[in-house]
Structures are given as C-alpha cells and as structure tokens.
C-alpha cells in the first residue's frame, strides 16, 4: 500500500463547477500538507500549504485537512478552463528542507468551457 | 529571475551511456532536490542537498550520483544508463521560513528533463 493515495482521474467538469480533489494517507505522523498544480509538460508549482488539521483558503482554492480520517481535500470554486492541470498532493512529517515530501500520483482535471 | 532552469530539456541515450543533467537556480536557495516522475508512481526523491558541498540520498538513489560544487548548481549524473531510468526528471530548490504554524518550506520546480533510454 502506498503511503499516499490519490485518484488519478481524469476528472472532467464544466466551467463554473466546484471541484473536489482528495488524497488519503496511511502515516498518521504527517503534519504538513501541500497541494501542487502541474500543467502539461511543466514542473509542479505550490498552490496551498497547511499545517496540521483545519482549513485554509486562498482565493478560489480551499485546502482541508482531516487528520482523524487521514484525508485531505482541495476545493476549487468557480472552476476555469485555466485550472485544467494535474493536481498533486504532498505531505511530510516535519517542516524544513531536511524532511522529505511524499507525493500522491496526481489527479488530472479538465475544466470544459 | 529565471527561477530554476534545467538542461537539457530532452535527451535520448543508449543503454550504458552516461550523461549529466544540470540544474541551476538564481534564488539563492540553500536546498536543492532531484526527483523523477513516472506514470502511476508520482514524484520520487532521488538525491537532495542542504547546502553547497553536501548531498544526501533520497528514496530512489541507485544508479545516480550528484554533486553540489556551487550553491546555485546541482548536477545529476547517470554513469551507465538503463531503460528503467527512462523518466521525467525534475529539479527543485527551496527555502524554509518559520511561522506560527511551524516551518513552511516552498519548493520551486524546474521545467523538467525528459530522458529516454533505449
């Protein structure tokens, strides 16, 4: 079993829809949770960074962490065609550079105009 | 700022050949990383460096070597390429900041190098 599981999709939604992307994990010691967006043939870019449980909002994006269920989510409101990309979740035990990020395999999202 | 750049963008090798992938960053970051990305496997850490002259093994280091002679550059070497090393390679650099919720580290990724080993 992988430490981090993510549905690969593809997930296709109409423009303006609310998108929910999810990851589950097995290591209850993870404390730092991230979402990266990766456009086709590009490198990932950090979207959201959260510590421990709770919600974090940034514009149309909301990251949610439920440590009791070992489940994290990324919600995208009013989705746009420019949101079409692969979304990777990542998590780590500790903050800082010497700890390692564990990535999910990514969910491919297509927002149809 | 160019951010993180990688050369080459694409390369085809024959089994047994060697090559070096170059990563450069102009953000004065202390930390640098090499990942590989394969379908169904996600991003996996190969090697990383927490400063000039230091390197450490990641999750999948076998068959690769690295060097960080200058702070801004991180080189990934394949001494004898194998078909299993066909992948997309990403370099990243980062810094860490302290905040009320702990330590936040933001990794900035390069555009990737596509490597095909025949």
Image (spheres, rainbow, N blue to C red):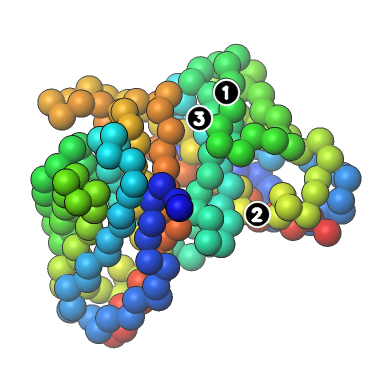
Residue A68: horizontal and vertical position, in percent? 16, 46
- Determine the residue positioned at 23% across, 81% down: A15
Residue A9 position in % (x across, y down): 39, 73
Q: Vertical placement of A106 versus A81: above or below? A: above
Label 1 element class: strand
SS for callout 2:
strand
Q: Report how far apart the C-alphas of labels 3 and 2 lie in the structure.
A: 19 Å
Q: What residue do we see at 29% from left, 34% from top?
A: A29
Residue marked by disc 2: B87
Which of the two labelled residues, at mark 1 and mark 3, occupies the earlier sequence position? Answer: 3
Say if residue A56 shows up in the picture: no
Question: Residue A101 occupies which quadrant of the picture?
Answer: top left
- Looking at the rendering, in which quadrant would you find the N terminus of chain B? top left
Respond whether the residues carrying marks 1 and 2 are from the same subunit: yes
State the residue position of label 1: B56
Which of label 1 and label 3 is nearer to you?
Answer: 1
Residue A40 left/right relative to A71? right
Nearer-N-terminus badge (1/2): 1
């Amino acid at each position: 079993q992988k430490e981090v599981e993510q549905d690969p999709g593809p997930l296709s939604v109409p423009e303006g829809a609310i998108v929910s992307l999810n990851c589950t994990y097995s290591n209850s010691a993870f404390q730092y949770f991230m979402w990266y967006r990766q456009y086709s043939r590009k490198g990932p870019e950090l979207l959201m960074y959260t510590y421990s449980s709770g919600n974090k909002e940034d514009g149309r994006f909301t990251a949610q962490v439920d440590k009791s269920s070992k489940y994290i989510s990324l919600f995208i409101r009013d989705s746009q065609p420019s949101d079409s990309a692969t979304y990777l979740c990542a998590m780590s035990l500790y903050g800082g550079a010497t700890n390692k990020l564990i990535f999910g395999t990514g969910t491919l999202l297509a927002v149809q105009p | 700022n160019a951010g993180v750049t990688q050369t080459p963008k694409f390369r085809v090798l024959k089994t047994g050949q060697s090559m070096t992938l170059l990563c450069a960053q102009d953000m004065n970051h202390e930390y640098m990383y090499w990942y590989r990305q394969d379908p169904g496997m996600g991003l996996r850490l190969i090697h990383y460096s927490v400063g000039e002259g230091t390197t450490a093994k990641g999750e999948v280091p076998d068959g690769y070597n690295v060097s960080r002679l200058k702070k801004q550059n991180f080189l990934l070497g394949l001494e004898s390429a194998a078909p299993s090393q066909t992948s997309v390679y990403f370099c990243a650099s980062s810094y860490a900041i302290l905040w009320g919720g702990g330590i936040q580290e933001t990794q900035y990724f390069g555009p990737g190098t596509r490597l095909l080993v025949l």
